[in-house]
Amino acid sequence: MVCLSLEVSAMPMGERIREARRKKGLSQEEVARELGISRQAVTKWEGEQSAPSAGNLKKLAALLETTPGRLLNGDTGEKAAAAEYYALFREEEARRAAQRREQGKKNIRMAACVLGGYLAVYLLGRLPALAGGGHSLLGWLLETDWQRLPYLYGWLTGHGIFWWAAAVSVLPALWGRWKFSWVTFAAFLLGLAVGEAAGSSPAAAPYGHGEYGWAIWGGIFLLAIGMGAALERLPPPDGKGLSRGQVRWGICFLSGIGLVVVLVRCLL
């Protein structure tokens, strides 16, 4: 009995996991599916190549109808097992906290990149105002005369819409919604380019201008808000390249942009 007890306590955790799994009549694929992980992860646990996190260890023990302590140290050394499990739990919590901090830094950097894109557009759009001369640096940065600025750019900055649109794109990046941020920024640029090239339309005169570029820009940007939110919900592709869902998303987005342009030109 003493020899048996020593043999059990000396058994590596990977072997204890394999033995408990086989007693339950489960395959590695079934365990992986129940825990929401890959089969390779289970193989590595049983082969002592890696160890389950505290959260996965708890779920694994429940699935195999045992305790985390028994998976860690077998039937002996319950106090040592509890201490080891607690240490593993604290290590897992520290790792997650470090991941959250790193993710927060990435989110800030991404938001700064999107904001930098808007600032670049803001400065480039003001270059035509230099042709007239007679500006101080501050006057050039705050120029609001639509006659000295590109039509649609002047409309966006003069009404403050430019910065509201920037906020819509930048702020979600702080919460990790990078795809949404870049989709709306790209739509801002595309809407600006297409809207700037739009022709005259007297029907838009009540809105302060004789062109309908503002409506094209607005339609494309509003479309991007919905499409950006939809893209965030799509699962990432399994391998290289785009998934079918992403391809369909791209087709819908481009078709929607074309529809916006057609509707604006027909209605205004």
Image (spheres, grey):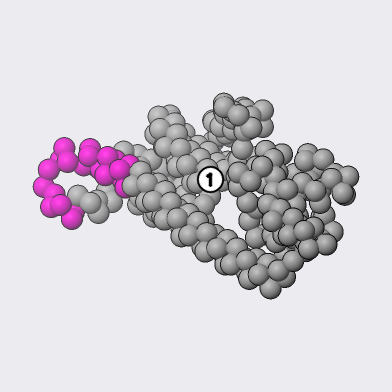
Residue 46 is drawn in which quadrant? Answer: top right
Q: In this rendering, would 51 be left or right of 133?
A: right
Q: In which quarter of the image is the N terminus?
A: bottom right
Residue 198 is drawn in which quadrant? Answer: top left
Residue at position x 51%, y 40% from top? 183
Residue at position x 71%, y 68% from top? 77
Residue at position x 69%, y 40% from top? 43
Viewer-proximal residue, 162 or 93? 93
Image location of residue 72, percent across then percent down: 69, 60
Task: Give above or below for 78 relative to 107.
Answer: below
Residue span colored magenta: 119-139
Image location of residue 151, percent across then percent down: 35, 39
Image location of residue 162, percent across then percent down: 40, 50
Task: Give above or below for 158 relative to 204.
Answer: below
Q: In this rendering, would 56 be left or right of 254?
A: right
> What secondary structure prevails in the magenta region?
helix
Task: Give above or below for 135 relative to 186.
Answer: below
**Does the rendering let one see residue 38?**
no
Viewer-proximal residue, 258 or 7? 7
Circle 1 packing at 10 Å, graded few (<14), some (14-19), many (20+), is many
**Does the rendering let one see residue 87?**
yes
Residue 246 is drawn in which quadrant? Answer: top right
Residue type at mark 1 is Phe
* Residue under numbered circle 1: 180
Image location of residue 136, percent across then percent down: 13, 52
Let me know if residue 171 is in the magenta part. Answer: no
- Mark 1 falls on what kind of element? helix
